[in-house]
Image: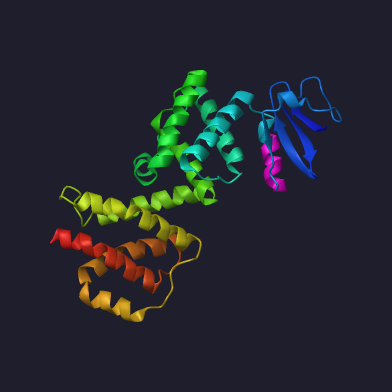
Amino acid sequence: MIIKKVINNNIVTSMDEGIEVVVSGRGLGFGHREGDAIDEKKIEKIYRIEDGEQLRRFKDLLAKLPLENLEIAEEIISLAKKELRTELNENIHITLTDHINFALERYDKGMMFENALLFEVKAFYPKEYRIGEKAVELIKKTNGKDLGKDEAASIALHIVSAELNEKTSMAFTVTQSVKRIFELLEEDFDRQIPGNSDKLDDLIPIFKHLIYRIILREQYDGDDKALYEFTEKNYPEEMRICRKLVTYLEEQFDEKIKMDEISYIVILLRKLVKNKA
């Protein structure tokens, strides 16, 4: 491989089968310039990012951060792929590396923050949160900086976004919205009543996916009027609670909730209402 551009002492770009790639490795660019051969023994990772704008962002990011921070991000990404047994969107190499670099800069300035969705991330995404905890431990072991549980939740959201091939902002929005839905549900259902807590928790993935469908404009729409009329007539209490949730969702996302989605929510709420009686 031939150096196309030296980004810094540890990062260069090259061409591979007609595609520009980013190549990292300690000392890879030191003392070298465009046209020099890359010492393949020093190569630690090759990044193939086909989107031109994302590639530009990645190169700009790598030009200003320590190699150690990139290595931490890569170890976390590898851990996530192994434990989740899934591929992650390539964009995570940019977003997570940038996030960790910024988090460490904030730490050095004493600018720690609380993650308002810590409890929800732990409850909604337990596997990803555990990876976030391991990431925090890795960072502490590497450079002695303890970023804490709030940062574990933030890292978990980046992983969730990469699993779903969506922006981190969407994962944040979904988590925040599910949190509000459960606040509304808890106006009617006391978690202290035996059975309620588990039944509410069972609804977490269902409401997560409902909100994703709303955001992506992919709601279930079989137009089953008969089922809707049946639930409306036979389950008035469940329909009342459902209307409250639907009002919030429609105002939040400026999207009318389809009839089939409402019927499904009402049926799901039936077990909770029975437990409440």
Q: Position of residue 138 (x, y in %)?
A: 48, 25
Vertical side of 130 occupied by 86: above or below = below
Task: Using residue 13 as the reference point, say whether residue 247 is left or right of it.
Answer: left
Question: Does residue 248 appear anywhere in the picture?
Answer: yes
- At horizontal 55% and vertical 30% (from top left) the residue drawn is 75
Q: Nearer the viewer, residue 1 or 270?
A: 1
Image coloring type: rainbow
Identify the magenta region.
51-60
How many numbered marks have been drawn onto this rendered protein structure?
Answer: 0
Q: Relative to 31, is 248 on the left or the right?
A: left
Q: Residue furthest right?
A: 35
User: Could you say where residue 238 lies in the image, as x and y percent from the top left?
Assistant: 24, 67
Name the one closer to the observer, 110 or 52. Answer: 52
Residue at horizontal 38 percent and vertical 41 percent from the top: 126
What residue is at 72 percent from the left and 24 percent from the top?
Answer: 42
Which residue lies at the image location 50% right of the left edge and 38% below the top edge? Answer: 82
Quadrant of the image containing the C terminus: bottom left
Characterize the magenta stretch by its predominant secondary structure.
helix
Q: At which x and y percent is residue 237?
A: 21, 68
Q: Quadrant of residue 10?
A: top right
Quarter of the picture holding the N terminus: top right
Q: Is residue 266 above or below residue 276?
A: below
Does residue 35 belong to the magenta stretch? no
Residue 117 shows in this picture: no
The image position of residue 134, as x and y in percent, is 44, 30
Which residue sits furthest bottom?
A: 226
In the rendered structure, the answer to whether residue 10 lies left or right of residue 233 reads right
Residue 267, quarter of picture: bottom left
Residue 53 shown in magenta: yes
